[in-house]
Amino acid sequence: MKFKNYEEFWPFYLSQHSKRATRVWHFIGTSFVFIFLVIALVTGNAWWILAAPIVAYSFAWISHFFIEGNKPATFGHPFWSLRADFRMYRLMLLGKLEKELE
């Protein structure tokens, strides 16, 4: 699909995460990114930084293939998808995602 800008992409991104379980799996995966970054800073071991996207995308893609039943938006729009994932994470953390889904 073609989008003119990120704000046009955002509703599509949300539609690709219609099931609560998919969003929860994304939230867990994105949480690991932050955990791994902290571990990398504390230990000084950069391998944790390299592992962060692998673990995060594993959770996300498994949820798309086995829960949501669609293809991850990352495949067509990697940068907007990453930005949208962090936006969805923040909204979930603040308890504001349900309003956004309406």
Image (cartoon, rainbow, N blue to C red):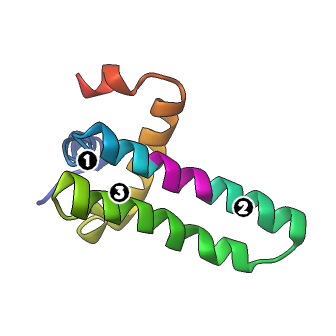
Q: Quadrant of the C terminus?
A: top left
First along the sequence among labels 1 and 2: 1
Q: Residues within 10 Å of mark 3 (few under 14, many from 20)?
A: some
Q: Residues within 10 Å of mark 2 (few under 14, many from 20)?
A: many
Q: Nearer the viewer, residue 76 or 45?
A: 45
**Spatial CA span between label 3 and label 1:** 7 Å
Rendered residue at 41%/43% (across/down): 24
First along the sequence among labels 2 and 3: 2
- Left/right placement of residue 5 relative to residue 80 reads left
State which quadrant residue 61 falls in.
Answer: bottom left
Dot 3 falls on a residue whose secondary structure is helix
Q: Which mark is residue 21?
A: none
Q: Main secondary structure of the magenta part?
A: helix
**Spatial CA span between label 1 and label 2:** 25 Å
Tell me the magenta residue range.
27-32
Residue beneath label 1, please?
13
Q: Which mark is residue 37?
A: 2
The reply to whether callout 1 and callout 2 are in contact (CB within 8 Å) is no
Rendered residue at 42%/51% (across/down): 26
* Circle 1 or circle 2, nearest the eye: 2
Residue 68 in magenta stretch: no
Q: Which mark is residue 81?
A: 3
Residue 14 lies, with reference to residue 61, above or below; the image says above
Dot 2 falls on a residue whose secondary structure is helix
